[in-house]
Each structure stands twice: as C-alpha cells, then as structure tokens.
Image: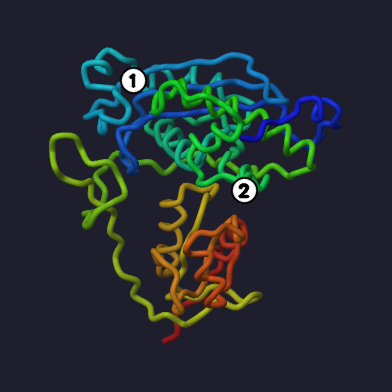
C-alpha cells in the first residue's frame, strides 16, 4: 500500500493550469447499453486541491426494469417513487457546473449522463472530464488492474458498499485527492478530455439489432439486449491511410479508448462518410483512432505490431470533413 505524504505536496507549487474544482461522479444504471438508464447518481464536489466541499445523492426512476438488481440492489419497488431524471436534472446540473467531471472509466458515466440530459431536452453543464484510470496510468501506479477497488486499496481507502453510487463516489473522491497531489508534485499533465453535449438523441426505435452486446442480462428474462447492426460498407477497402492524405471511402477504421464525442455518434459519422467501422484491428485496418496510443489495449498493441497508422480523435474529426470518394 502506498500513501501520499501531504507534507510533500503542501510544499509543492500548485500548477496554475490545473482546474479550479472537480465533481466526482458515480452513476448506477439499468445496464451498459446505449438505451439503458440511470437509476442512482452521486456527486462529491471538490475544490482545486481535491478537498471535499459537499456531497449529494439521489435515486432515479428509470421507467423500466432496473436491470441487474443483484449488483446494485435497487429494485422496482425501491425506485417506484423516485423522481424522474428530468425532475433532478437541474439540481444535478448545479453540482456539475463549472467543474471537471471525475469518474472511474469516465466515458461511461459521461455518456450515460449526456444521454439522460438529451432525453430531458437539456444539456449537462460539463466541458471537461478526467478518468481516474487514465490518471493512474499517467502516474504509473503499480496497480494489479484498473478496478476501483484496486485504486482504493493502493491509497488505503476502505470500500463500505460497492456498487452504491454514494459510496463509490466517496471512495473515488478519497483516492482522487492523493492522485491529484501526486500529479501536482511530479508535474504531471492531467488527462483532461472535452465533453461535448449529446444533441442527436432520438427516442425512436433503433435499427434492428443482432448478436450479443456487453451488457447486463435482464433479470428474469434469460435474454440479452441485442447489439446495433450497421449496413455493410458498400466500398472496397483502398488500403492504409497515409499521413498528409485524405481518408478515402471504404477505409477500415477502428476506435480504441475514451473519446470526447459519444463513441456511437463518432462511428455513425464515419459510416455516413463511407468508411468501414471495424470492431478489431487486423492487417487490413486502414487507421486506428485513439486518444491514448501508449495504452496496452489489444487494438493499440496490434496496431503497433502491424504498423497500422494511428491518429487521435481531433485529427480524425478533421479528416472526416473531407473524405475522398471511392475509386470507380
């Protein structure tokens, strides 16, 4: 177990580029899919140095089956009289306003929050997010894995109620503070990513879905929520992308890691531009898009071994503006 000596950080000149406040967030949900809902949310507000200012917690009525009750413990009876998301959206927004959203696997929490606000015809007042998994990588923490419990154990934080939003947010807040101080002490750049509001939400049924999705199984149904199916790319693969040249219709593009834009929206835009969105990296992959090229994901490892070109999300977004037509 490694504990941070606050006397060291007390003598450290605090980086002026660091944010002035944070909102440590955890949400429990009915599942992991795009159409799943938030059933509870917690926020710990922290000042610029990670000290707790206050905390807030609420249940949310998802207006549907609560999903994996055996994980989060929130039954339909418990949630029946809870407020709808639209009824707590304003108070939730007050907790997030003018702060960096901090979460463990932040892309998931942000996407769930952004979708709920889009359903409520509102916008979450969040401009940046920080993933504590990414921060632990920046700090080179000797963790056995990237689970919250491992990060908590590293800093001596005791978990009381795992998968309870308020306790998970508390644990993360307590682990984030020494992480933040370690970053300040060592001059580490915080891995901040832009949060763009989701404005393309629709409650209309999605296109037919096939196959299995990495989501929770609905309790009592014995079935899986089906994954989204896109039409096959009509263009042949022209090969790898070359730096300095435009993307060409038919190119196979894979994505890895956290993205500022909702991943499905980013993939949709790629498909609309005539690109083939690949779920894995192979020798045929034209381009890998990732904001963390040094991560050890299977896609980044394969991309390096195959010599697959790699660009970040911002560069890919620019390339999407001018995709060349397929040959023939």
The residue positioned farthest toward the front in the image shown: 1
Tell me which residue sits at (57%, 72%) in the image. 304
Q: Earlier in the sequence, mark 1 or mark 2?
A: 1
- The residue indicated by pointer 2 is 137
Whether 56 is drawn above or below 24: the answer is above
Tell me which residue sits at (24%, 54%) in the image. 212
Whether 39 is drawn above or below 233: the answer is above
How far apart, in angstroms, are the residues tagged by discs 1 and 2? 37 Å
Q: What colouring style does the render use?
A: rainbow
Quadrant showing the C terminus: bottom left
The residue positioned farthest toward the left in the image shown: 221
Is 167 displayed left or right of 227 in the figure? right
Which structural element holds mark 2?
helix
Give 153 or 72, whichever is nearer the viewer. Answer: 153
- The residue indicated by pointer 1 is 84
Circles 1, 2 touching at the beta carbon (< 8 Å): no
Q: Residues within 10 Å of mark 2 (few under 14, many from 20)?
A: some
């Amino acid at each position: 177990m490694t504990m941070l000596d606050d006397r060291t950080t007390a003598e450290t000149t605090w980086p002026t580029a660091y944010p002035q406040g944070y909102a440590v967030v955890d949400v429990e949900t009915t599942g992991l899919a795009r159409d799943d809902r938030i059933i509870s949310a917690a926020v710990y507000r922290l000042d610029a140095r990670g000290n707790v200012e206050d905390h807030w917690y609420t249940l949310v009525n998802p207006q549907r089956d609560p999903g994996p009750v055996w994980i989060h413990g929130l039954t339909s009876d418990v949630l029946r009289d809870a407020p709808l998301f639209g009824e707590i959206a304003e108070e939730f927004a007050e907790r997030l306003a003018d702060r960096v959203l901090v979460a463990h696997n932040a892309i998931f929490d942000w996407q769930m929050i952004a979708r709920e606000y889009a359903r409520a015809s509102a916008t979450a007042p969040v401009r940046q997010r920080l993933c504590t998994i990414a921060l632990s990588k920046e700090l080179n923490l000797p963790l056995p894995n990237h689970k919250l419990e491992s990060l908590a154990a590293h800093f001596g934080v005791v978990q009381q109620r795992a998968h309870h939003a308020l306790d998970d947010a508390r644990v993360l807040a307590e682990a984030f503070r020494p992480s933040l101080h370690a970053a300040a002490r060592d001059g580490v750049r915080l891995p901040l990513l832009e949060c763009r509001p989701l404005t393309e939400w629709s409650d209309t049924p999605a296109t037919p879905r096939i196959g299995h999705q990495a989501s929770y199984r609905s309790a009592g149904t014995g079935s899986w929520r089906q994954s989204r199916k896109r039409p096959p790319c009509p263009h042949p693969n022209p090969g790898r992308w070359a730096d300095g040249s435009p993307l060409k219709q038919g190119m196979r593009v894979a994505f890895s890691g956290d993205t500022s834009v909702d991943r499905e929206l980013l993939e949709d835009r790629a498909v609309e531009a005539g690109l083939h969105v690949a779920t894995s990296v192979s020798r045929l992959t034209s381009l890998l898009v990732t904001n963390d090229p040094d991560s050890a994901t299977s896609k980044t490892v394969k991309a390096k071994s195959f010599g697959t070109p790699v660009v970040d999300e911002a560069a890919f977004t620019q390339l999407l503006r001018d995709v060349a037509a397929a040959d023939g």
